[in-house]
Structures are given as C-alpha cells and as structure tokens.
Image (tube, rainbow, N blue to C red):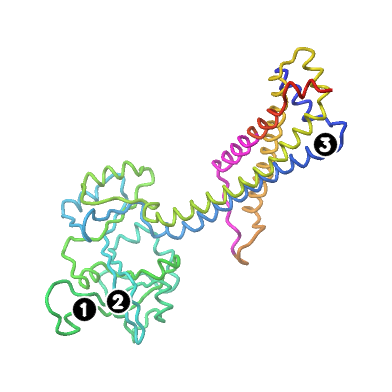
C-alpha cells in the first residue's frame, strides 16, 4: 500500500489526542455531507419541476412539426401527401392552418387569439382529448370550436350554448380601398363545444377549429397549410424520421422537435437549474473551507510526527501527499454519504409525498443519474482542490521547527 495513503487513512479514522481537532474534523465532515445531500435534493426537485412543467406542453406538442421555410404557408401536393402516409418512421400526421383572429362573444372582445384549424388526424398525433376540461372535442366539417380556458373565462364562454354564437373575424386578404366593414373582414359564426386546459399561455392563445372552417375563414388556397405535425413510431429515432420527412418535403420546410417548439421555456428552466446549481456549489465551497481549516489544524498537531517521518527518510512531497489524501478521502467519503442521504430523502418524497405543494399535489422529484454523477464530481473536485491548498502549506521550514 502507498505509504502516504496508509498514513492518511490512519489520521482520518483515528481520533486525535486534541479534542478540538476532532470536533473541527467532525464539523467539516458534516458540512460536506449536508452540502452534497442538499445539492442533490435541490437538483432532483428542479428536475421534477421541469418535467412537471413540460408534461403539459408535451401533451399537445407533436414529436416533430414541419413549418414553411419561407412565408406563412406551404403547398403540399397530392403525391407528397401519399408519400407522407407511407413513411415507416411516422405513425400519423396532421395538417394545420393557423392564424391570428379577433374573437367576439356577445358584448366582449378578445383580440389576441389564434385560430388553429386541424384535421381529423389531430387526435391521433396529440393527446388533445386528455386536456378537455369541459365538453367534447370538435367534429370535422362543422362550425364547432374548442377554446382555451383563459379565453373562455375572459369572454364568459360556455359549452354547447346554441343561443349564443362565437364570432371569429380576420382581415380579408387583398388590396384596394375599403368602403364598408364587411369588405374589411371575413367572419364566421361558431359553436363552442369544449374547453381545454393546458397552461396559462396556451389557454390564453388558441381556439381549435376544423381545418375546412379555418381555410374558408382565412381564404387559404387548397393544399396550402401552416404546418404539418407528426407522431413517430415508438421504435423510430428522430434522426431517421427527419431524413424521411425531409426526403419528401425537401428544403421548403423546417422541422422542429418538442424542445425546439418550446425553446424559450426550456432555456428558462435550464437557466434556473444552472443558477441553483451554482448557488449551492458556492455553499459547498464555503463548507470546504472547514476542510482546509481541519487539515491545517491536523498539520500543526502532527508536526512532531512529521519531523520524525522526515528524519527517517520521508520526502517533503510524500508528507504533503498524506494530508492531500486525507482531505480528498474526507471529501469523497462525505460526498458519498451525503448522496446516499439525499437519495433516500428523494425516494421517500416520491413514495410517500412528504412535502405537498397543494393538498392534492406532492412536490415533484425525479432521481436522475446525471445529477448523482454531477454532485459527486463537484464535491470530489472541490475537495481535491481544498486538500491541495491545505497540504501545500507544509514546508521544510515547518517540519524542522521544534
């Protein structure tokens, strides 16, 4: 066994004759254990919150979405439609027409809505049925709509209220002077048959309609679409699907996955996660100052022993390595123990819902192996740096002083 490592283990696991040094070592170890446990618990909590937040948008987000590379609409030929239906990596696809509309309901108006015209395959591509809070999903080739919860609350829209119709308005395309209001807008009377509830942004934005109704309202030419949404086969990879879809549609479209469709949300969540990691890493750095202090106190306490080792042939570097190994072992073992405690706490929260956000909603937590590795590497690297700083304080002059 390595001489320096052997002595380091003896110093680490053997009590010092000085009780103050024992207490300082225990405090330093507890700081490492609690710091690593806290960092892992917080990272697991943010991972749970991230997945909890994204699960709502992923319900109605397709696996891949093709959008026009230029302009508002893409033209899809009959041959391209047939080819899309035969792709091996795609289980279903849905054509979309989307545009901003002005909504009026009785005496109330809503200017910030988007109409989303969808075909009959949309329910296969997304799990839109699972977020219908009231009513039902719309029927194709009808004047039915499904509104977001936010729009419904703002306009006081009910479900299946045939005595009150929802009016949708969009500016007419074209040029020339407008002489009347009817010439300025296309309008459509619709019946609201359902209300969906996903998140605040989507609830305040979208009104779903049959694609034929959207095409007529917006005067979109035949075979022109705002987007095509795809659901992939379970065994298909995204890369394979991209190659097949682009092989049919070419460079007239850009493809986006779920993360790219919600890039602002992903960036915000990742930034928050990084900020929390850096804050708790700073806490760990402060805790590791205790390790430096503990090692320096140990060096001063063992000064006589060090002089004996030096006199019997031990080199200055081997003596420095003793305390380097001691501090590194303290950090690594404390980190492992802290991770074990943190892992148990996270598992208990997942199993028994110890902490609740609301009476019915437990705080979401997820165990991710990358977080375990990240915390272990963080505490190990910081501990090694702290041990190196402390052990470098040992000099020949220090050892030779009586």
Asked whether the beta carbons under mark 1 and mark 2 sit within 8 Å of each other, the answer is yes
- Quadrant where the C terminus lies? top right
Magenta stretch in the rendered image:
361-383
Provide residue 350's location: percent of width, then percent of height.
62, 53
Local secondary structure at mark 2: strand
- 376 relative to 316, above or below: below
Mark in front: 3 vs 1: 3
Provide residue 388's location: percent of width, then percent of height.
66, 30
User: Which of the numbered marks, if any, corresponds to residue 46?
Assistant: none
Asked whether the beta carbons under mark 3 and mark 1 sit within 8 Å of each other, the answer is no
User: Which of the numbered marks, if any, corresponds to residue 185?
Assistant: 1
Q: How many numbered circles are shown?
A: 3
Asked whether the beta carbons under mark 3 and mark 2 sit within 8 Å of each other, the answer is no
Is residue 46 within the magenta segment? no
Provide residue 129's location: percent of width, then percent of height.
40, 64
Which quarter of the figure has residue 243?
top left
User: Which of the numbered marks, if any, corresponds to residue 102?
Assistant: 2
Local secondary structure at mark 3: helix
Q: Residue at x 82, y 36 (%)?
A: 21
Distance between the Cα atoms at labels 1 and 2? 10 Å
User: Which of the numbered marks, if any, corresponds to residue 22?
Assistant: 3
Which quarter of the figure has residue 74?
bottom left
**Mark toward the start of the polypeptide (1 vs 2):** 2
**Mark toward the start of the polypeptide (3 vs 1):** 3
């Amino acid at each position: 066994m390595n001489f320096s490592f052997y002595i380091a283990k003896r110093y680490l696991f053997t009590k010092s004759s000085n009780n103050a040094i024992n207490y300082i070592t225990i405090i330093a170890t507890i700081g490492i254990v609690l710091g690593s446990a806290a960092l892992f618990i917080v990272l697991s909590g943010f991972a749970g919150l991230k997945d909890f937040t994204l699960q709502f948008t992923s319900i109605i987000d397709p696996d891949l979405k093709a959008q026009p590379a230029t302009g508002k609409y893409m033209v899809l030929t009959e041959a391209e439609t047939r080819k899309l239906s035969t792709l091996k990596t795609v289980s279903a696809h849905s054509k979309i027409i989307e545009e901003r509309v002005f909504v009026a309901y009785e005496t109330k108006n809503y200017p910030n809505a988007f109409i989303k015209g969808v075909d009959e395959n949309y329910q296969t591509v997304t799990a839109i049925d699972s977020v219908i809070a009231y009513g039902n999903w719309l029927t194709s080739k009808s004047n039915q709509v499904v509104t977001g919860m936010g729009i419904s609350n703002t306009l006081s829209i009910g479900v299946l209220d045939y005595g009150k119709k929802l009016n949708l308005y969009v500016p007419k395309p074209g040029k020339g002077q407008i002489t009347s209001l009817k010439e300025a807008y296309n309008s459509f009377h619709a019946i609201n048959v359902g209300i969906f509830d996903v998140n605040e942004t989507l609830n305040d934005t979208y009104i779903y309609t049959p694609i034929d109704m959207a095409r007529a309202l917006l005067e979109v030419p035949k075979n022109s679409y705002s987007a095509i949404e795809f659901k992939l086969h379970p065994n298909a990879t995204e890369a394979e699907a991209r190659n097949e879809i682009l092989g049919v549609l070419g460079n007239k479209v850009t493809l986006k996955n779920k993360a790219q469709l919600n890039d602002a949300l992903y960036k915000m969540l990742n930034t928050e996660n990084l900020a929390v990691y850096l804050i708790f890493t700073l806490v760990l750095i402060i805790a590791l100052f205790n390790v430096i202090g503990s090692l320096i106190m140990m060096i001063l306490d063992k000064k006589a022993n060090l002089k004996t080792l030096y006199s019997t042939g031990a080199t200055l570097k081997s003596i420095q390595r003793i305390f380097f190994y001691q501090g590194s072992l303290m950090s690594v073992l404390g980190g492992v123990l802290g991770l074990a405690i943190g892992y148990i706490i996270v598992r208990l929260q997942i199993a028994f819902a110890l902490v609740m956000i609301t009476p019915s909603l437990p705080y979401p937590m997820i165990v991710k192996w990358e977080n375990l590795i990240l915390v272990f590497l963080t505490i190990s690297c910081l501990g090694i740096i702290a041990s190196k700083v402390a052990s470098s304080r040992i000099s020949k002059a220090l050892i030779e002083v009586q």
